[in-house]
Image (spheres, rainbow, N blue to C red):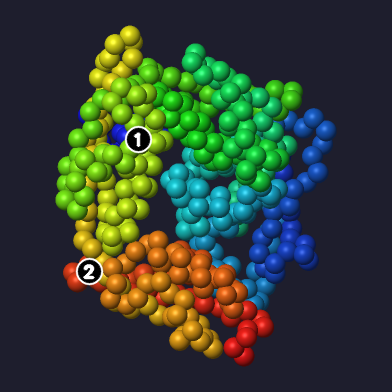
Amino acid sequence: MLGISGLNAAVMGQVGSPASLLRCDDEGMPGRPTLKRRQPAPDSPAANVNSSDQKLAEKEKCKPQSGDTDAVNDQNLVRIDFEGLHALSESDLLKYFRERGVGLSRDRFPDSKVLTTAVAATKDLLEAHGYLNAAIEVLKDEDSRTVMFLVKEGARLPIAEIRFDGNEIFSSPELAMRIGECLEHYEASQNGYDRQIFEVCQHQVTNFVRSRGYLQAKFGEPKNEVTEHGLAVTIPVEEGVLYRLGEISIEGANLLPPEQVRAMLSLRRGDVVNGEAIGRWLFEDLKKVYGEMGYLEFTTEPETEFKAGANGEGVVNFKVTIDEGRQFRLRSIKFQGNNLPEKELRKLLLIREGDIFRERLFKRSVDQLNDTEWFEFIDKDKDTDFRTNEEEGLIDIVIKITERPASPFD
């Protein structure tokens, strides 16, 4: 038996050339030691993180000048700098360090293990953005308590080919085409590989396969290979077997009879299971119906049971548990903004205080406000605040309105 997470999964869907520590020039911040990279000699030997443990060739240090900030004057703090980092912001990289538990901190001078981990994490994040040939060198100076990462990002690689391994029912060209269509919708993926966007598109293709009855299809971790034309991405595939619909039992439905809830799903017993259709039924269609009756806290929790069927196919049974929650009425609706003709605005509302809250009528009310073109566009999600009183089943709404530059009410 699989719980809701099971249904969601099954149904819905390095180094560069050496560098030295040089005296700060006038362009640096006063009193702060600055690491400058020397121009490397041709074919200079590569260095690694451990080489930074050796004494740097030049020991000239910048000395703090008067007027430095407290942070600079505090000799116990570690200064961490990145040179050559353009694809990422330093704040995003440091956040990634924290998420990965790298342990790089301004409070303690890092040892070689921490620096090695930081280099690996930096390369991983650059690789996620398509920079698979990045090289990183670390310079550290304990006397000045300074650490610098010298980054050579290299070229960002485009996706040259998407391959699939293990698929038999669905052709590789069809699957690759669907991922490609998805990638076209994201500007960040136009000029090169982006792991996060690729994962989103891979998830969409997984949902497509499951919508064709292969509910337990799995797409594995992509493997990247650098070719002369760019990046070749290979995705392992386990299609599994075709599933047909078995029994659907519904529990917890009181406002609507279970038969009426079941009738909202067009699939019948024996049909090839469409995972996307079942997902829409459970998490969109039912929620909309209950929402129209004021049951804003309505939830469903499905469980699946996969069984062997005839002819090498499978059968899946569903147990759907419904929590209807309680019904909400509108206690108040207010407008927030300057110079508002509140009386005129209230005439446009299709929902009144004391009424059962209906999402459809509220949406239409916001549409009618926007149709006047008196104000800047009102987003029904971003420009409205909802506050609920669960004990009394009441809801208060505030609609934020911004005047247009030339308002008719000036």
x, y (%) of residue 206? 47, 30
Residue that appears at 36% across and 27% down: 273
Q: Earlier in the sequence, mark 2 or mark 1?
A: 1
Which residue is farthest bottom?
410
Give residue 266's mark. 1
The quarter of the picture where residue 31 lies is: bottom right
The quarter of the picture where residue 217 lies is: top left
x, y (%) of residue 238? 43, 19
Residue that appears at 74% across and 48% down: 37
- Look at mark 2 in the image and give the residue it sits on: 393
* Residue at disc 1, secondary structure: loop
x, y (%) of residue 291? 32, 58
Q: Nearer the viewer, residue 39 or 178?
A: 178
Residue 12 in view: no
Residue 392 in view: yes
Q: Amino acid at mark 2?
A: Gly
Quadrant placement of the N terminus: top left
Q: Amino acid at mark 1?
A: Ser
x, y (%) of residue 379? 51, 66
Residue that appears at 54% across and 41% down: 196
Q: Is residue 366 left or right of residue 352?
A: right
* Residue at disc 2, secondary structure: loop
Is disc 2 surrounded by few (<14), some (14 to 19) or many (20+) residues within 10 Å?
some
Q: Nearer the viewer, residue 300 or 272?
A: 272
Establish if 141 lies above or below 241. below
The quarter of the picture where residue 317 lies is: top left
Is disc 1 surrounded by few (<14), some (14 to 19) or many (20+) residues within 10 Å?
few
